[in-house]
Image: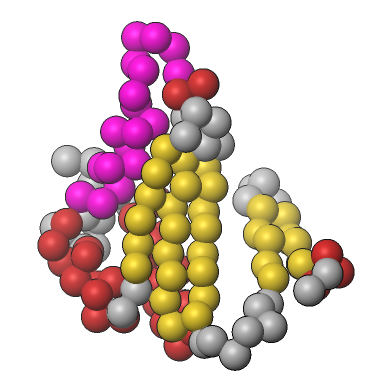
Amino acid sequence: MSSKDIKTHTFANGFHVVYQKSNQSNPLTSIYILCNVGSAYEPVSIRGASHLVEHMCFKGTTSIHTPKKLLLQYNKMGANINAYTEKRYTSYVLKAHDTHTEQCLTTLSDMLLHSKME
């Protein structure tokens, strides 16, 4: 696989997408969302805020009301979801069968954009 197989697109709002089709026959999709937030950008008075927000995204959304329902949504698709916070970014990682890519992206975007933060 070469760098010419990597496609990128930047939306008007600054959101960047990097896509690379696998040459493996395995029908799996991996999605990595990297947010430009981490402890390196936090003042001492709110140190740990990025990590807290990472965890709060798993607490439910305005349409998927509880953490249990959110995780059941992913389990029904056989998807694996995880997240971690580094000094310079927070990453949300999702892996699922290719047939569930759209539904996984919908659920993940709901988590990131409509989290209840309770």
- Classify residue 90 as left or right of residue 1: left
Q: Position of residue 58 (x, y in %)?
A: 26, 51
The reply to whether residue 110 is visible in this rendering is no
Residue 65 vs residue 41: left or right? left
Tell me the residue at 69%/71% (across/down): 20
Residue 97 against residue 62 in the figure, above or below? below
Q: Position of residue 97 (x, y in %)?
A: 44, 83
At 45% from the left edge and 24% from the top edge, which residue is drawn? 39
Taking the view exactly as shown, the residue that stands out farthest to the top is 45
- Residue 51: say if magenta: yes
Quadrant of the frame with the N terminus: bottom right
Q: Is residue 72 left or right of residue 32?
A: left
Q: Residue at x 34, y 73 (%)?
A: 79
- In percent of width and height, residue 8 lies at 75, 61
Which one is in front, 87 or 24?
A: 24
Q: Quadrant of residue 109?
A: bottom left
In the displayed structure, 96 sits above or below 41; it is below
Quarter assignment of residue 50: top left
Residue bounds of the magenta highlight: 41-59
Asked whether the viewer can see residue 95, the reply is: yes
Question: Is 92 or 110 nearer to us in this picture?
Answer: 92
